[in-house]
Image (spheres, coloured by chain):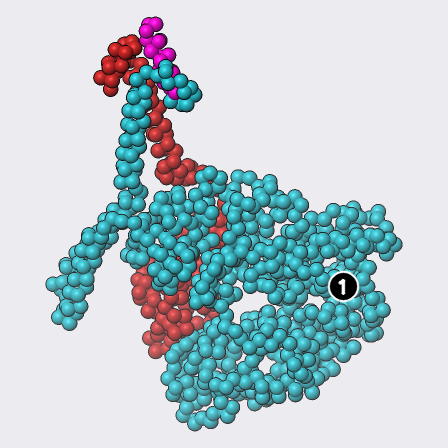
Chain colours: A red, B cyan
Amino acid sequence: MEENIKGTSKVKERMSIFPVIITLFLIFVVSASAFLFGMKRFSSTYARTKMEGHSPEGQDPLGDTLSKSMHGLTNVQIAGKTYYEQYCMVCHGEQGKGDGFNAFNLDPRPKDLTVVVKTTGNEAIFKAVSDGTIGADGRFQCPPWGRTLGEDKINVIIAYFHALEESSLHDTDMQ
Amino acid sequence: MSRVSRHFKNLLKEISFFLFITMDKSTLGPIHYVWFAAVGSALAVVIVVLCIKEYAREWKHHQAIARRLQIKAVEEKIKTLESELPSVNEETRAKHEDRLRMMKMIRAQALAMPVKIQQIQVDSLKRVDRCTTCHTGIEDVNMNAHENPYKGHPGKYLQWHDIEKFGCTICHEGQGLSTDYMHAAHKPLRGLDRPWQKAVLSRYLIQSSCGKCHLDKEVPFAPLLSKGRDVIEKAGCSGCHKIRLYESQEKVGPSLDLLGSKVNRAWLLRWLSEPREYDPSAGLIRPRMPKFNLSKEQILALEAFLMASRNDAALKEPVEGGDPEAGALLFRESRCVTCHLVEGKGGYLGPELAGITSKVSKKWLYSYIKDTHFFQPRTKMPQFNFTEKQMSDIVEYLCEELQGEELEIPEDFENVPDSDKNSGEMVNNGKKIFMDYGCTGCHAKTGIDQGRIAPDIIGLGSRDEEGLEWGNVHGIDKYTGNWVFARLKDPILLDKKAKMPVFPFTEDEMAAATVALLSDTMEDIPSQYIVSATNRNNYPDLPGEFGKLVDKYRCRSCHVVYGDGGWVSMHPLDGEGSEVRKEWLRGYFTLPYTLRPILAERMVNLKMSDSEIDLLVNFFGSVMVLNSIPVEEYTFKEEEIAKGKSLFDKYGCISCHIMGKGGGYVGPPLTTVGDRLTTGWIYEYIKNPRYYETWSLQPDYGFSAEDARALTAYLASCKEVKKDIRISQGK
């Protein structure tokens, strides 16, 4: 570059290298800052932090209403809730405490599911729901729902048992 | 300094040449080589930056972390398996070693997996998804506890819908081809930031995607969608809008012919200006009448038009000597609350009866009960076979017990002359408003049939949200779902000229209806993926004498009869002849009693004549039968009955059924079940409860044929010899 400048200076007049260097430097600074700005502005992390900076309250009325009416349960638990209400609620009660309207009629009383999920593993619960429970006198207590409901429905119902347990913890906290 | 400034001048010339401002080459110095160098180096910088950016893509980072997590999980399993290995007994040792080998193989696979973009191509649904590039562990159940994007898919949705066959965006939406968080449209954005038309559906809204293929009313594992579809059907949205799945629905409101003879003017004015005043209960309990955005003049004109259609000559005076006490007994015996509300309690098919006198006159009540289908040809209410005295009794009871205060014309309307004195112009005006606001969507009116007046909302889920009119709504995420929700909540906010009324939904119902409406995206789904109810034998109009009776008593309001009806009971009557005994059926038609004590809805006492009962019983016994159930009754031995009794005790049937003195209230009482059901039905039902009633709560114990026979024997022996029937006078 310098050679070129020297070569041409013989024809016309000598030219200083400084303005060129200053200009190149300016160009570099401007483009570098533009690049850095662009990287920041158009990067996904920037956009995401901008999104997350928004207060979600009131931004999405539909989503808020849905989560309010679904009590923040997962989709699996909601599905479990509908089947729980159809099949289990009459005996185990709305909150799973074993106080459904048919509970008075049963001896022994239906189990408190919020306790059961804490003490028993999911596989054992699945077996109990699917095959039914048999008391010491050889009589059925909880009927076997395996053939009626099938594996998938029982699994979502068990997921809802866990939601019941969480909500019962929440209730005691509130008190 | 001057030399430096000259050089700058030179440089300016260069710049002007470079920017094509001046093309005077003579002034050009050799300095433009500097520009060449500058552009070249800028290009080099850009290429380097692009390479670096491409190298440091987000998904590579995610894949690396996901792989580390997966390997960690597998190694933990290997460790526990190895530590357990010495203590394992001989029998399960081989199995244990197999599992260990398998885990090691998985580890080797995970280690050898190349870092690359993953892609699922689904030709039949026209989707190409690269979501699994970041969400690598989506099919791995062990990853469920981790945060996104390393999380495994919750539930069994991927087992039901193979990811290779369906992809991701068919349910979740968003831009499948992108491997960048924002460009994949994880969040709904608008304007220049919007990367894709449809953003990823939020947590609960995802259920609307189930409705793309699942066209049934009840969609398994998607309760929100099912609820939404129910709301749409009951609110009668299809009266004004064309909606997929509801094209052939009937009008939900009553006919408005003869309204002038039915209601009084004060009530109608109040009803038109604020329907909630009459019954403030929100939700889909009656009244379903929405509130229209009408001015005072419009209401008056509409009222003039509606009151003009009358036929006072058709109204008859009730016979003298109605006894309200006898009416009260009849009211309970006929189970009017199965359909009607009384002070907020009861069924939802009919209107609220408390305060009925502030709406209609005694004369109308009497004439309506006497000649129900003359005044409302499409009503769900049956034509009761009361005697004139009984009708008079029940009218007397309604007017005395459920009396409402006499309504006065609202203050704003007081100074306006009575509509009878109004000119024909006002009536014409009212007719225009009646048609303009689409009252015909819900109400029939002779001479006016204009079809659906509102825009089609077929394919609402696929609307481009940029094209939606948002009006005065600000500060919310502007995507289609929110628009539909806002529209249901308050249409005026979105569009000042909106004619759509405000429906009395609760917020939950609005949200559920939105989910259901968004499920129609007009996508081209191949027919093998469509899940829809099997075509039942559907006879819209039943022929012959039986058809006439079904129409007269409106059986289909409550029951499903040959694929149609069933607003109260789910149980289809198509096989009833095989289920119940003829003698029982005859008694039940004469005096219905409660089969399930916990239900508020009960069979209505229609006071059918003996010949009608004969016809129905014979038709049920000979036509409405199931081929799979034998006509002959089984005969049983004594020891079978004894065995059945012990089985009945062992299986805890008494937990849900009443037998003798004790028992639960979940199922029907079995004390006299032998009188009611045929042995063939009992046997088949115990053996396979869900074959005949898919919604049945009866648990399937998987009885052997022998046990089922024994139980049938015991149940068939549960009979009551003599019945003490107490019925009201007159029948």
Residue drawn at point x = 27 percent, y = 49 percent = B116
Residue A33: horizontal and vertical position, in percent? 34, 26
Residue B256: horizontal and vertical position, in percent? 74, 62
Number of numbered labels in the structure image: 1
Label 1 sits on residue: B447
Compared across the picture, whether A112 is left or right of B592 comes to: left
- What is the span of residues highlighted in magenta in the rendered image? B1-17
Residue drawn at point x = 55 percent, y = 77 percent = B537
Is B339 a magenta residue?
Answer: no
Q: Secondary structure at mark 1?
A: loop
Compared across the picture, whether B433 is left or right of B221 comes to: right
Residue B646 visible in the shown view: no
**Which residue is situated farthest in the left direction here?**
B86
- Chain letter behind tag 1: B
Report the amino acid beneath label 1.
Gly
Residue B51 higher or lower than B326, as above or below: above
Which quadrant of the rendered structure holds the C terminus of chain B?
bottom right
Give B359 or B104, whichever is nearer the viewer.
Answer: B104
Compared across the picture, whether B95 is left or right of A109 comes to: left
Residue B98 visible in the shown view: yes
Would you say the magenta stretch is mainly helix, strand or loop? helix
Residue B680: horizontal and vertical position, in percent? 48, 87
